[in-house]
């Protein structure tokens, strides 16, 4: 089994925001022939399908971003896949808009969903696929990741989501190294930029909103 987890915040309020590109990739993948309609399990929306002989589970945690690990832990505890058979797709505001970065393991890089997943699983040995959503202005990280893309950015984002879906399919079929070789490409960050899988600056946190779904002590950012 392969498990592909897309991170985001549930609800119409957050649909189409930068923080929800992980959800968008899962929705794109779930449109492929043979995938079941989403159903709610493991505090997530889950769809199951097949790629050849491989079962693929698509997961959108409903715990809000900062508690994503709770859902991922429930999936892993139930199905018991090897951790290297888990791919997590998320946004990264330290990557240029639309750029993809795949890594087999490493730091959460300040991305709060990845941070919680690593806390819950007790390991960083899952694969992560980050999608660049553009850099915020000074002190504007929360508003940036919870904002929607500008009209001039939408074409690049749609292409990035499609490319991320293709990277996920390649990961399922051929593994992490093949996906890295095809989709990471040469670095375009320029001098002085750090690798975002190994310690980028923290993604901002935001207090949780009241609502019907249990979210714990953290919020959606």
Image: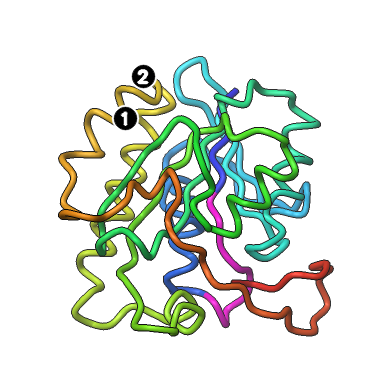
Query: Secondary structure beneath disc 2?
Result: helix
Query: Could you say which is closer to the camera, residue 218 or residue 98?
Result: 218
* Quadrant hosting residue 177: top left
| Marks 2 and 1, the one that precedes in the sequence | 2
Query: Could you say which is closer to the camera, residue 188 or residue 194?
Result: 194
Q: Is residue 119 left or right of residue 126?
A: right
Residue stretch in magenta:
6-14
* Quadrant hosting residue 175: top left
Confirm whether the magenta stretch covers residue 198. Answer: no
Marks 2 and 1 close (CB-CB < 8 Å): yes
- Total marks shown come to 2
**Quadrant in the picture for the N terminus:** top right
Give the vertical position of 6 relative to 86 (above or below).
below
Q: Which residue is mark 2?
A: 174
Residue at (21% x, 64% y) in the render: 156
Query: Could you say which is closer to the camera, residue 80 or residue 112?
Result: 112
Query: Secondary structure beneath disc 1?
Result: helix
Q: Is residue 8 left or right of residue 220?
A: left
Where residue 28 appears, as percent x and y from the top left, is: 41, 52
Q: Which residue is mark 1?
A: 179
């Amino acid at each position: 089994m392969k498990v592909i987890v897309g991170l985001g915040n549930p609800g119409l309020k957050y649909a189409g925001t930068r923080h929800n590109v992980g959800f968008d990739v899962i929705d794109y993948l779930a449109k492929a022939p043979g995938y079941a309609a989403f159903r709610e399990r493991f505090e997530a929306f889950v769809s199951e399908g097949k790629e050849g002989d491989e079962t693929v589970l698509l997961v959108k945690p409903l715990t809000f971003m900062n508690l994503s690990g709770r859902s991922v832990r429930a999936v892993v505890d139930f199905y018991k896949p090897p951790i290297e058979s888990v791919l997590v797709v998320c946004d990264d505001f330290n990557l240029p808009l639309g750029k993809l970065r795949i890594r087999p393991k490493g730091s959460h890089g300040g991305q709060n969903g990845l941070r919680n997943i690593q806390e819950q699983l007790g390991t960083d040995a899952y694969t992560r696929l980050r999608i660049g959503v553009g850099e915020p202005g000074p002190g504007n990280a929360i508003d940036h990741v919870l904002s929607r893309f500008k009209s001039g950015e939408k074409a690049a984002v749609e292409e990035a989501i499609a490319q991320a879906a293709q990277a996920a399919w390649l990961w399922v079929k051929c593994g992490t190294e093949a996906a890295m070789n095809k989709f990471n490409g040469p670095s375009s960050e320029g001098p002085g930029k750090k690798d975002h899988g190994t310690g980028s600056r923290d993604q901002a946190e935001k207090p949780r909103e009241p609502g019907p779904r249990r979210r714990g002590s953290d919020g959606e950012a």
